[in-house]
Amino acid sequence: MLILVPWKPVVILFGFFTALILFSYYGSALIEGKNPFVPYGSAPNHVIAGPSPAHSSTDHKHTRKANPAKSD
């Protein structure tokens, strides 16, 4: 027995639901104040200021001294 499926309405519904999901994602990102076109969501590569945990020692081996001003 052959079951015939009308593919045109199926494709139209699939496209409608895909567009609905896409536009709802863009809308929610804009409402939250995020840029929806940033790759990998909104997690940019942040550089963390300060020493790394491996170098968190408070004593420094090298100290930087200011150069004395030259007098003419």
Image (cartoon, grey):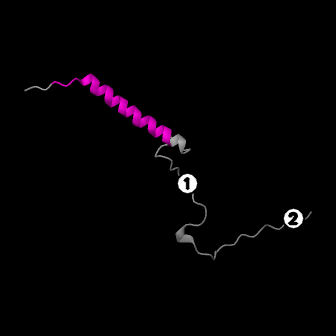
Is residue 35 in sight in this rendering? Answer: no
- Which residue appears at 69% of the width and 72% of the height? 63
Q: Is residue 31 left or right of residue 21?
A: right
Residue that numbered label 1 is attached to: 46
Query: Which label sits on residue 38?
Result: none
Residue 19 among those drawn in magenta: yes
Q: Amino acid at mark 2?
A: Lys
Q: Which percent across, then down, holds residue 57? A: 59, 75
Residue 53, percent across and down? 53, 69
**Residue 53, above or below 11:** below
Could you say where residue 68 lies in the image, as x and y percent from the top left?
83, 68
Which span of residues is magenta-colored?
A: 4-28
Q: What residue sits 49% from the left and 38% below the top? A: 27
Taking the magenta stretch, the answer to whether it contains residue 68 is no
Of 31 and 66, which appears nearest the observer?
31
Q: Which residue is mark 2?
A: 70
Residue 47: percent from the left, percent from the top?
A: 57, 56
Q: Is residue 19 left or right of residue 66?
A: left
Chief secondary structure of the magenta portion: helix
Q: Judge by depth and name the residue closer to the eye, 71 or 28.
A: 28
The amino acid at mark 1 is His
Q: What quarter of the picture does the C terminus occupy?
A: bottom right
Q: Quadrant of residue 4?
A: top left
Q: Which residue shows up at 48% across the image and 43% down it?
A: 39
Q: Secondary structure at mark 1?
A: loop
Q: Residue furthest right?
A: 72
Distance of mark 1 from mark 2, alpha carbons? 41 Å
Query: Is 46 drawn above or below residue 50 in the view shown?
Result: above
Labels in figure, total: 2
Horizontal side of residue 18 vs 7, given as left or right: right
